Amino acid sequence: MENQIAYFSKSYKVITMDCRGRGKSELGSDTLTYMLMTKDIISLLDHLRLDSVYVIGRSDGGIISLLMGIYYPERVKKIVAFGASLVPDTTVLYPSIVEEIHRDRVQAEEMIEKNDTTRDWYLIRQLNRLMEFQPHISVYDLRKIRVPVLLLSCDRDVIKEEHTLDIYRNIPRANLCIFPGETHWITSENPDLFNSTVAKFFSGPFRGYEIRN
């Protein structure tokens, strides 16, 4: 997200964090869940004494951003959720992605059994268990989100387009954008397109609510 940090820091105070088990953040002793990471972010906002923020979430961060909107609506001004998902199966992800996550989790467990220390297999197991068995967000939960939401995806993303469309249809105040010819890595491969789209959503009034009602 370095391109997004550089771009948005020109107009906003940008706060970034490594979620548990990512970057320089330790995994901790709890089982890794999306809700746990959401609560970590709320604790960070409390620590920084910030009442509400604009949120950009990519992939896992997209899931977390939706959970923030569901469970902590007063802490969010607007949400941009890119590559988010509600359930961890082939209705959402392409079979090759589901198989890869499962294979990596099984490999990590096998290496733990062998007491292999060439990699942090405990962390790898947790991260892949997170993606293999979570999240579980219902469309009824989505309907609780009252802040404006921009749902982003790509027609070459790992998340199926129809799933992003389902999310969009169940959030009362949502906009939808599916980038043509882009991938899950648009934030680094085509940051100008991504950033300008998000910036327009953040800076202007929400439009579209009147049509859908």
Image: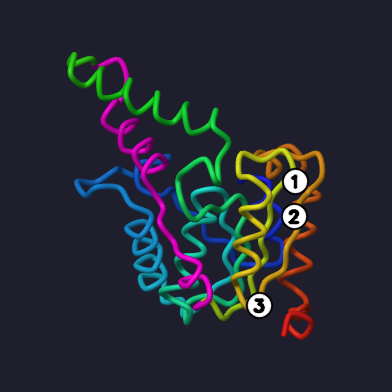
Spatial CA span between label 1 and label 2: 6 Å
**Mark found first going from the N terminus, 1 or 3:** 3
Residue 110 picture location, percent across and down? 25, 18
Question: From the viewer's perspective, is residue 204 above or below residue 7?
Answer: below
The reply to whether the C-beta atoms of the residues labelled 2 and 3 are less than 8 Å apart is no
Res. 173 mark: 3
Could you say whether the residue bearing mark 3 is in a helix, strand or loop?
Answer: loop
Res. 59 mark: none
Q: Nearer the viewer, mark 2 or mark 3?
A: 3
Residue 160 picture location, percent across and down? 64, 45
**Residue occupied by mark 1:** 191
Q: Is residue 182 magenta?
A: no
Res. 195 mark: 2
What residue occupies the far front of the structure in this picture?
A: 91
User: On the picture, is 211 further left or further right than 98?
Assistant: right
> Which quarter of the image is occupied by the C terminus?
bottom right
Spatial CA span between label 2 and label 3: 21 Å
- Binning the other alpha carbons within 10 Å of mark 1 as few (below 14), some (14 to 19) or many (20 upward) gives some
